[in-house]
């Protein structure tokens, strides 16, 4: 086994990927209010099914449209002593930053435009799923742990254990956002990964 270090090619990939990522992050951020719409709608439907009448809806935050405002029908006593329906903010961008990362990696590698488009379409759908996962479990985490009391009881009545919430929330925050885009890129560009890894088997006579 011998190392074949194609440093220039790998450096070129990293440089191009970094430049494309900067461009991708700008597009991703400025269009976040629009590509978050299906995430909000699907998360809304899932939470409605899980929490029944205790959940109201998810709307865009009026001040920052890319943020989600989760609204419930759960009575909550605020620090000033007033009582009203519990609501809070969830940031869906925490779970989708892998999309510009995948965009940068895919645009930096040598591949046909057809393969690039297919990879980015698959990646967009996968990261959309990660976003929904993150929004749903963060909402349940906020209700069960952050606010507790009556909101925690609503989650308990839905049959969702604290251990499951903690596990799925950690997966959604720490594991899935960085892992999914890299995994998709590696699978889509396996031959390129082997070439950049630079290992080949030499058989001596």
Image: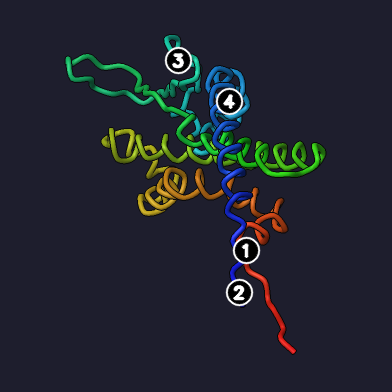
Residue 129's quadrant in the figure? top right
Q: Residues within 10 Å of mark 3 (few under 14, many from 20)?
A: some
Q: CA distance from mark 3 to mark 2?
A: 56 Å
* Tag 2 residue: 2
Q: How much space separates mark 3 and mark 4, taking CA atoms?
A: 25 Å
SS for callout 3:
loop
Sequence-earlier tag: 3 or 2: 2
Which type of secondary structure does the marked residue at label 1 adopt? loop
Contact (Cβ within 8 Å) of mark 4 with mark 1: no
Q: Which residue is mark 1?
A: 198
Q: List the residue tagged with mark 3.
A: 61
Quarter of the image where the N terminus is located: bottom right
Residue 60 in the image: x percent, y percent? 50, 16
Label annotation for residue 45:
none
* Of labels 3 and 1, the one closer to you: 1
Which residue is disc 4 drawn over? 23
Task: Looking at the image, tell me whether mark 3 or mark 4 is earlier in sequence order.
Answer: 4
């Amino acid at each position: 086994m011998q190392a074949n270090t194609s440093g220039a090619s790998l450096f070129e990939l990293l440089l191009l990927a970094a430049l494309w990522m900067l461009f991708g992050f700008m597009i991703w951020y400025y269009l976040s209010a629009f590509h978050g719409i299906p995430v909000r709608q699907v998360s809304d439907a899932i939470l409605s099914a899980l929490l029944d009448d205790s959940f109201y809806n998810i709307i865009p935050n009026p001040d920052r449209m890319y943020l989600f405002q989760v609204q419930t029908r759960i009575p909550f006593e605020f620090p000033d002593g007033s009582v009203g329906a519990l609501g809070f903010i969830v940031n869906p961008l925490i779970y989708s930053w892998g999309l510009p990362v995948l965009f940068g990696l895919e645009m930096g590698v040598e591949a046909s435009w057809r393969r690039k488009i297919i990879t980015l379409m698959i990646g967009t759908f996968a990261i959309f799923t990660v976003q929904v996962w993150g929004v749903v479990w963060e909402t349940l985490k906020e209700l069960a742990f952050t606010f507790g009391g009556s909101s925690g009881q609503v989650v308990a009545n839905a049959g969702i254990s604290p251990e499951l919430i903690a596990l799925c929330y950690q997966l959604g925050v720490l594991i899935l956002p960085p892992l999914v885009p890299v995994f998709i890129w590696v699978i889509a560009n396996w031959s390129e990964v082997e070439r950049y890894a630079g290992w080949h088997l030499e058989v001596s006579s």
